[in-house]
Structures are given as structure tokens and as C-alpha cells.
Image (tube, helix red, strand yellow):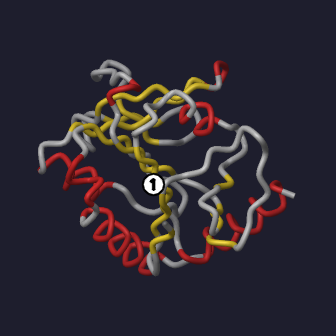
Amino acid sequence: MKKSLRKNILEIRESMNHNFINDASNNIIDKILNLNEIVNAENVMVYLDFRNEVKMDRLVKELKSLGKVVCSPITIIDQKKLIPVAITNLEEGITISNYGIREPLVSNLHIEVKSIDLVIVPGVAFDLNKYRVGYGAGLYDRFLENIRTDTKTIGVGFDFQILDNVPTDPHDKQLDMIITDKRHIL
């Protein structure tokens, strides 16, 4: 069920044109920047987008200009683990992983998981109950098990990625909020 859902949504996302992705991403970033959760956060974890995900570079730059510590995960696939590492800048401080995903340099400052105040979570599909379908490796669900109980989790996606319900497993983590180009799901 999750596999076919993932395939269908990814095909739609891949087919979206560049202008839509940019405009909708900017709309989502504007909404994120207006959240009290951002104002109150000192350490924010974001993902670095690829393959028509909501674009994060502007958010990274804006958060850094506000004096926030911004980190992004390095993936250790054989340990099924995400390690949060500071983003120094989006040019020299980034490398491309074996999976084609931009990641901070491993030599950058590693951020303690318990110090993260807010996590921006990517996904393939989301539902009205604030659950998500990711890419299938379970990396974010495992990571989210280790954050503080008061750390906020915000899923971001385009509105076509929102379904009434997505299939869930016992280990799937419910998010605090989902933001799309058209709505907030609280």
C-alpha cells in the first residue's frame, strides 16, 4: 500500500514544473517564518531538498540571518541513522552524498539531538491526522524517537501531497503540524 502510494505521489511531484515548485516553496517558507515556533527556536533542523521537494535554501538563509543554528542530517544508511550537522553555508559547507542528496560536511559541527527545538520534516505524502509517508527507510521516524518531547515537528509538502489518510505502522510518528502551499494542518 505505502509502496504504490509513494510511487504515485512521487510521479506527480516529479512532473510539476519549476515555476510551480519555486512559487509554492516560497509560499510555504513565508508561512514557516511567521510561526511562533520559529521565533522561539534556537536550533532548527531542516532537510536539504532534492527531486522537486519543497525548496529549503531560502529558509536556511533566513533562519541563519535571524541568528538560529541551522542543521541538516547526514545519513548513515547502514546504521539507519540521521546525524544532525550544522550548515555553515549552502556553497562550501555542503557535499553530495552517495544517494545524491545534499548534506553538510561531516567536519561541520555536530548538533546534539536533544538541543534541537524544531524539525522540518520532508515526506512523500501526509494526511489530515499529521502522519507522513516517507521514502521507505524509516530514518526520520527513528530520528524523531530521540528528540525532546517539547521539540516541534513540522511536515512540509505541496497540497497535492495531502491525503485524507495514509497507511501507518506502529513506529510511525505523528507530526505537530503540516504546512502546504494552501493550508496549515494543526
User: x%, y% of residue 36?
Assistant: 25, 59
Residue 149 to residue 38: above or below: above
Determine whether, in the image, residue 137 is placed left or right of residue 61. right
Residue 120 to residue 140: above or below: below
Picture quadrant of residue 30? bottom left
**Residue occupying the far right of the picture:** 1
Crowd rating for badge 1 (residues with CA inside 10 Å; few <14, some 14–19, many 20+): many
Q: Secondary structure at mark 1?
A: strand
The residue located at (45%, 67%) in the rendering is 179
Residue nearest the observer in this picture, 166 or 8: 166
Query: Could you tell me how many numbered marks the image carries?
Result: 1
Picture quadrant of residue 19? bottom left
Which image quarter holds the N terminus? Answer: bottom right
User: x%, y% of residue 41?
Assistant: 25, 44
The residue located at (12%, 50%) in the rendering is 65
Determine whether, in the image, residue 31 is placed left or right of residue 152. left
Residue 71 to residue 65: above or below: above
The residue located at (45%, 72%) in the rendering is 184
User: x%, y% of residue 160?
Assistant: 61, 77
Picture quadrant of residue 136? top right
Q: Which residue is mark 1?
A: 154
Give the amino acid type for the residue marked by disc 1 in the picture.
Ile
The residue located at (67%, 73%) in the rendering is 12
Determine whether, in the image, residue 1 is placed left or right of residue 47. right
